[in-house]
Image: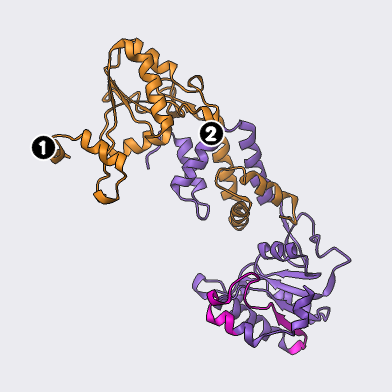
Chain colours: A orange, B purple
Amino acid sequence: MEFSSKLLERAVNEMSQLPGIGKRTALRLVLHMLKQPKEQITMLAEALQSMRNDIKFCKSCNNISDEELCEICSNPNRDESVVCVVEDIRDVMAIENTSSFKGLYHVLGGKISPMDGIGPHDLNIQPLVKKVEEGKIKELIFALSSTMEGDTTNFYIYKQIQEYNIYTSTIARGISVGDELEYADEITLGRSIVNRVPFESSLKS
Amino acid sequence: MEFSSKLLERAVNEMSQLPGIGKRTALRLVLHMLKQPKEQITMLAEALQSMRNDIKFCKSCNNISDEELCEICSNPNRDESVVCVVEDIRDVMAIENTSSFKGLYHVLGGKISPMDGIGPHDLNIQPLVKKVEEGKIKELIFALSSTMEGDTTNFYIYKQIQEYNIYTSTIARGISVGDELEYADEITLGRSIVNRVPFESSLKS
């Protein structure tokens, strides 16, 4: 791609570094920006920079936060004895949207994935083990993706905390609400039968 | 979507103003940026701002440029008597990539589209008419999209310059190179028969 302007070329190159944005999409976005008021682009640029420079991570759960402790960890109404282990900040947002969890979170920042060069020490696992050691946690809920990497990470953490004898659980795998049985894959369907729940409990939610 | 940080929320909101980027994509991009070095985000922010603030439009053809006149208009080897009328800077880049045009361009900046509130006076049409008036142009090639808006714009310009009696042409519509006939739509196929060219001329390219 040949550009008639170095400024344009630089902007397109920088934008196309973002994941899922190729040169063509970057050019489309940048040409759109050219039609916007200058103030708006200044606002965008400043929002990105101040986000990158000033954002903090909660020192307890590693969630994104503007303070030392995030809103969830500093909320006295949440049950600090139940901790949900998630990969990512997006998972915290997804679970919060369901309003069905009143405990705290622990954000690992990824999952163990030797293929991508991510080992246990690249993740926020030791602080979790320390929290368990201190004896405040009664239940640990594993809410990682149901992939080989997720399962490996679950098992690694499980091994680390096994000696402290706390209750560990994992979120239910089964048929999605609204899904038809015949289209479900066999592993999911099999698990949903093995982990069946009393019919009365399904009436509550 | 609820955010645990105002900085994050602002960055996501600003990013989701861009066309084709919703809140979820914006969040994915912004979380990716958080993992990048601070310098890279500073470079991105600066590239966008300096592009928006310092970019110029060629005073002759309205193409994006770092100088008063763009590289194409200031190139003495290009034929200034043939002018190709295009909607957008991207069209200039697309035609330049083919290396088959040695004239100059004229970028309209859009097409007449009453539905979107874009009339002839919102486009860069008058400077084109003025160029024709001055008598430097021998041929005008219309290379707008083959849509109702494109056709309307072509016709509007044609009416404005009709009195000056210059040669006007439009890019050929027909079957794409490599396409199979049976999958072509009937209007395109019809036009490709009406506008057939001598067989010898197809051997040259």
Q: Position of residue B175 (x, y in %)?
A: 62, 76
What residue is drawn where x is 26% and y is 25%? A77
Q: Secondary structure at mark 1?
A: helix
Instruction: Name the quarter where the N terminus of chain A is drawn.
Output: bottom right
Indicate left or right for A55 with A92 as reference.
Answer: right
Going by the picture, which residue comes out furthest to the left? A200
Chain to which mark 1 belongs: A
Q: Which residue is mark 2?
A: B34
Up the image or down, B108 lies above or below A83; here it is below
Q: Position of residue A79 (x, y in %)?
A: 26, 23
Going by the picture, which residue comes out furthest to the right? B76
Q: Which residues fall within the magenta stretch? A: B163-190
Up the image or down, A99 lies above or below B143; here it is above
Give the residue type that dot 1 points to: Glu
What residue is drawn where x is 74% and y is 55%? A2
Q: Position of residue B74 (x, y in %)?
A: 84, 63
